[in-house]
Image: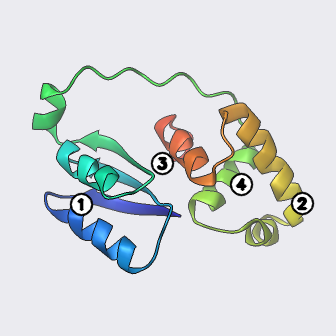
Amino acid sequence: MCVVVTEVADGDGGALVRNLRRRGAPRVVVLTRRAARPELSILLAGGLRGAVASTTSPTLARAAAPTVAPPPLPELTAREVSVLKLVADGRTNRLIGEELGLSALTVKSHLARISRKLGTGDRAELVAISIRGGVLS
């Protein structure tokens, strides 16, 4: 499951972990625009599979080790990007196919091709890599 949160403010990480546990969400990746590094640590320590923030709080970012720019992403076709956007919205292959006028098998083929290009078969990780690489916003 991929959970998108606008911001994880101080103290929100623990509450988010508790809510996800209560709902029985076993494999979760949190995507957020802003979060403090301690909150990201709380999310990961709480059992989430991953947490990605496009920016961290400025005071913590200055004190942190320099970040390494992610490697450039391989080129994705417009159709592959449209499929990824719908994956990021949590849609199934069948629903993506219905929205784009494709069969679920064709959507599966697009996802396999995207997976080969990005080096992972995990839907949440595909979305996270695409967000970090600037393909999705």
Mark positioned earlier in the residue sequence (3 or 4): 4
The residue carrying mark 2 is: 105
Q: CA distance from mark 3 to mark 1?
A: 22 Å
Measured from the top left, where is residue 87 in percent x and y?
Answer: 64, 59
Q: CA distance from mark 3 to mark 4?
A: 14 Å
Q: CA distance from mark 2 to mark 3?
A: 26 Å
Evaluate if marks 3 and 1 touch, with contact meaning CB atoms under 8 Å apart: no
**Label ID, residue 13:** 1
Measured from the top left, where is residue 129 in percent x and y?
Answer: 54, 39
Q: Image point 88% across, 56% down: which residue? A: 106
24 up-or-down from 42: above or below: below
| Residue 8 visible in the snapshot | yes
Number of marks in the image? 4
22 up-or-down from 17: above or below: below
Residue toward you, 93 or 28? 28
Q: Amino acid at mark 3?
A: Ser
Q: Image point 81% across, 48% down: which residue? A: 110
